[in-house]
């Protein structure tokens, strides 16, 4: 080990003449630790909510949607071609359109989605979100969202009237299922119907609105989109779950970036403490610096001593903060320390926490980097000291 490192470690907790230097260093490490821990916790919780929202967004919609500008009559052919593509886990047809739902004197606009229950299970998690009942396999059955059911006073067995712009008279349907996706807009406006019933209801014959595609890896949706578009060509239109939620996902990324920058100020302030503590240390060690220079130490040697000091403080703070942050994240993930309202966060009773290795690495790297950066000035001052002046007043 170099003599610079040995001297730096001796100076780090110097108590003989200047006990307050050790206290200041301890405060600096504590500040960095808290800043790092807070950053890791907040970023991990935000990652958890992002993942939970992602699961909800693609829970009722597939990873990729294929629609057509003209009548979509070649459903079986397209589904066969898509199922052979690499990375495709499942395909299912759907029919979709706007309608008005009525229950007594109450009415509201809804989005009717016709699906084939067996095939739909392979592309979405629709049937995992049912609170009561399911979408029955008999004609005339529908499933409604929990918010819509509460507003209209619906329960299993209730009858509702649905009217589309192509209907001459309302279609009377029976509620056989109530789902709760956790997304208010879906639970308020979405109504599921059997595929054949939806085709009849919208007067589409055997045509489809589109085909849903589930992928083995949802993050590969943009690449698979290009493959599908190349496979099918015009006039088919391919959209991924990212395309359909572009604004929301963009807002979440911006929020995460801004939160990182704001909380990074905590680490910045703690790193400034390191500059202050090292400056005080340089002042107190002026005589030692003069002696070392008189004995042949170069300015670079002296700079290394105080740079090692700053790096050691940064590493210590980053390590302690990383351990603390990981511990709190594990606690929040496994125990309902902060209870979540069940009417908003359906299916989860604790904070969703996902520690991302890239985020943790960025936080730790930033803490160590800032600590090293702010130790440069006092290290440079120590390297420039004149040994004669340093020893003159001692």
Image (tube, rainbow, N blue to C red):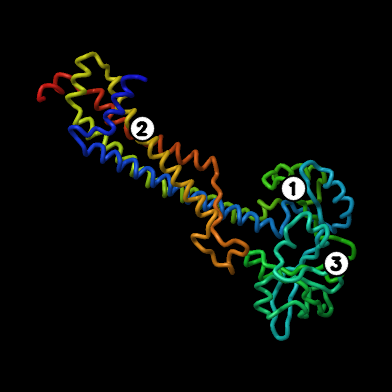
Neighbor class of circle 1 (other Cα within 10 Å; few <14, some 14-19, many 20+) is many
From the top left corner, tell me how far across and down residue 189 is, in percent.
68, 70
Question: Distance between the Cα atoms at labels 1 and 2?
Answer: 47 Å
Nearer-N-terminus badge (3/2) = 3
**Mark closer to the observer (3, 2):** 2
Whether residue 94 sits left or right of residue 43 in the image: it is: right
Q: How many marks?
A: 3
Residue at position x 34%, y 28% in the image: 308
Which residue is denoted by mark 1 in the rendering? 215
Which residue is denoted by mark 3 in the rendering? 199
Question: Distance between the Cα atoms at labels 3 and 1?
Answer: 26 Å
> Where 191 falls versus 38 (above or below)?
below
Judging depth in this view, the residue of 373 and 127 nearest the camera is 127
Whether residue 371 sits left or right of residue 42 in the image: it is: left
Which residue is denoted by mark 2 in the rendering? 312
Task: Judge whether residue 248 can be spotted in this image.
Answer: yes
Task: Judge whether residue 265 can be spotted in this image.
Answer: no
């Amino acid at each position: 080990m170099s003599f610079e490192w040995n001297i730096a470690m001796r100076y780090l907790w110097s108590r003989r003449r200047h006990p307050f230097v050790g206290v200041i260093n301890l405060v600096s490490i504590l500040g960095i630790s808290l800043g790092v821990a807070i950053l890791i916790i907040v970023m991990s919780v935000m990652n958890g909510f992002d993942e939970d929202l992602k699961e909800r967004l693609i829970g009722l919609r597939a990873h990729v949607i294929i629609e057509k500008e003209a009548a979509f009559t070649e459903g079986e052919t397209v589904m066969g071609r898509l199922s052979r593509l690499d990375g495709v886990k499942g395909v299912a047809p759907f029919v979709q359109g706007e309608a008005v739902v009525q229950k007594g004197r109450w009415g509201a606009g809804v989005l009717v989605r016709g699906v084939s229950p067996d095939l739909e299970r392979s592309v979405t998690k629709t049937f995992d979100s049912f609170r009561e009942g399911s979408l029955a396999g008999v004609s005339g059955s529908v499933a409604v969202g929990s918010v819509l059911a509460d507003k209209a006073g619906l329960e299993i067995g209730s009858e509702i009237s649905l009217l589309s712009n192509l209907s001459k008279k309302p279609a009377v349907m029976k509620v056989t299922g109530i789902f709760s996706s956790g997304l208010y807009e879906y639970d308020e406006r979405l109504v599921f119907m059997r595929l054949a019933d939806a085709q009849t209801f919208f007067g589409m014959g055997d045509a489809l609105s589109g085909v849903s595609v589930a992928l083995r890896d949802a993050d590969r949706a943009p690449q698979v989109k290009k493959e599908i578009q190349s496979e099918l060509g015009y006039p088919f239109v391919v959209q991924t779950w990212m395309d359909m939620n572009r604004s929301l996902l963009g807002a979440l990324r911006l929020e995460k970036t801004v939160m990182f920058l704001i909380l990074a100020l905590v680490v910045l302030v703690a790193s400034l403490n390191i500059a202050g503590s090292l400056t005080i240390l340089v002042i107190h060690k002026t005589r030692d610096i003069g002696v070392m220079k008189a004995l042949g130490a170069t300015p670079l040697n002296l700079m290394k001593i105080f740079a090692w000091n700053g790096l050691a403080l940064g590493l210590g703070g980053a390590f302690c903060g990383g351990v603390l942050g990981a511990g709190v994240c594990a606690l929040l993930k496994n125990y309902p320390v902060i209870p979540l309202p069940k009417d908003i966060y359906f299916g989860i009773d604790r904070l969703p926490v996902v520690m991302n290795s890239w985020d943790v690495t960025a936080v730790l790297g930033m803490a160590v980097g800032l600590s090293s950066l702010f130790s440069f000035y006092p290290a440079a001052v120590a390297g420039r000291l004149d040994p004669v002046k340093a020893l003159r007043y001692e």
